[in-house]
Amino acid sequence: MRDQFRIAVFTIVEGATLVIWLALVRSAAGIYQVSTGSLVAGLAVLAIGFTIEHILAYNVIHNRGLLDLRGVPIAQKFVVSLIETVIWAVWLVLADLNMILAAVVLTGLLILEHTLSDNVFKGRDIFSKLLDARTIGFSLVEAVGAAIWLALVQANLSVVGVVILVVASFIEHTLAVALARQQP
């Protein structure tokens, strides 16, 4: 139960990060036009939010205090966060063109990001392994949750969409923590 609560904490951080990012990039300028300021702010929110999420996840995986920064590979987690920021930005651009294509691309790119993240969780070099088949399932869960979230936001059912996003992220995070705790 303690793990589930701690996973919920970093899941909420990720969910809030994605919701704030989407609100920023889809704000005042309209759904298909983005101002430079809101785009930059949105990307900054993603990079910072994902970094916080990844640090919290690292501490959950290693059974440490959530805010304990001693020994956390912050630079590597920041690199993973920047990669994830680019992934979500690409996804949103593709989603405006074709939601199914965007979900497929997001799944593939999340497999890469989740593999890189797992490398860091296990103390390996960030790029020591680029693709781990064990990340496919939970990457798919996250991508489907994101696609449903965005579709519901566009249908003015944002609250329901956020709930689906957070539930999918919680499932993904629970599976990612289990994988990260497995011995290499």
Image (cartoon, rainbow, N blue to C red):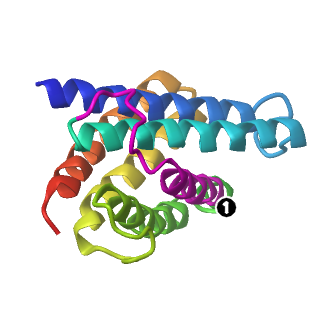
Q: Is residue 67 magenta?
A: yes
Residue type indicated by callout 1 = Leu
The structure residue drawn at horizontal position 31% and vertical position 52%, both measured from the top left corner, is 141
* Residue 135 image position (x, y, % from top left): 28, 64
Task: Please indicate whether residue 75 sits to the left or right of residue 32 in the image.
Answer: left
Q: Camera-side residue: 124 or 21?
A: 124
* Looking at the image, residue 66 lies above or below residue 40: above
Task: Please indicate whether residue 53 sits to the left or right of residue 84 in the image.
Answer: left
* Looking at the image, residue 113 lies above or below residue 81: below
* Looking at the image, residue 27 lies above or below residue 104: above
Q: Which residue is mark 1?
A: 97
Query: In the rendered view of the protein, which quadrant contains the N terminus?
Result: top left
Circle 1 — which element? helix
* Looking at the image, residue 153 lies above or below residue 112: above
User: Does any portion of residue 155 appear in the rendered image?
Assistant: no
**Circle count:** 1
Task: Please indicate whether residue 83 sits to the left or right of residue 93 in the image.
Answer: left
User: Does any portion of residue 131 appear in the rendered image?
Assistant: yes
Q: Is residue 5 magenta?
A: no
* Residue 128 image position (x, y, % from top left): 39, 77
Q: Camera-side residue: 113 or 71?
A: 71
Q: Which residues are magenta?
A: 64-90
| Quarter assignment of residue 125 | bottom left
The structure residue drawn at horizontal position 41% and vertical position 54%, both measured from the top left corner, is 143
Q: Main secondary structure of the magenta part?
A: helix
User: Farthest residue in the front direction?
Assistant: 70
Query: In the rendered view of the protein, which quadrant contains the C terminus?
Result: bottom left
* Residue 96 image position (x, y, % from top left): 67, 54
